[in-house]
Amino acid sequence: MDNCRISWGKVVELDGSSLIVEVMPLLIVGHSLVLGSPERRTVMREFDRSGFVSTAQVGDWVSIHWNWACQVLSPRQVANLERWTRYHLDIVNETL
């Protein structure tokens, strides 16, 4: 489930065609889906010199889908993505 959701992460290191990002993973705790404590994860930035976030730098926020960095995000976009993610987790957790 965590790979399928569109998430966000802060770039902490550039590593060639990959980025090291700090993300809040989706976890199952008891009978609830929650966002866990931040952890570092490697995501793809490009393949064969093609990608979506070639301008990403340390400190930038990026959206992530299936371990691919998809877009550099503004602070407002990060806040909206987190807000709507938490909103939908609340709905899911009401039915679990």
Image (cartoon, rainbow, N blue to C red):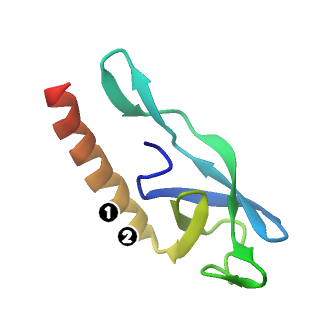
Distance between the Cα atoms at labels 1 and 2? 6 Å
Residue 23 drawn at (x, y percent): 57, 48
Q: Say which residue appears at 63% left-offset and 79% top-offset.
A: 53
Q: Nearer the viewer, residue 50 or 61?
A: 50
Can you identify the residue that label 1 sits on?
A: 80
Name the amino acid, label 1. Answer: Asn
Judged from the image, the secondary structure of the residue bearing numbered disc 2 is helix
Q: Please identify the quadrant where the N terminus is shown.
A: top left
Residue 15 drawn at (x, y percent): 83, 64
Quarter of the rendering containing residue 48 = bottom right
Residue 93 drawn at (x, y percent): 22, 30
Q: Say which residue appears at 77% left-offset and 84% top-offset.
A: 49
Mark 1, residues whose alpha carbon is within 10 Å: few (<14), some, or many (≥20)? few
Q: Please identify the quadrant where the C terminus is shown.
A: top left
- The residue at the far front in this view is 48
Mark 2, residues whose alpha carbon is within 10 Å: few (<14), some, or many (≥20)? few
Judged from the image, the secondary structure of the residue bearing numbered disc 1 is helix
For residue 90, side relative to residue 20 (left or right): left
Contact between labelled residues 2 and 1, with CB atoms less than 8 Å apart: yes
Vertical placement of 74 versus 38: above or below? below
Can you identify the residue that label 2 sits on?
A: 76
Quarter of the rendering containing residue 54 = bottom right
Vertical placement of 94 versus 49: above or below? above
Q: Nearer the viewer, residue 46 or 40?
A: 46
Q: Say which residue appears at 59% left-offset and 67% top-offset.
A: 69
Name the amino acid, label 2. Answer: Arg
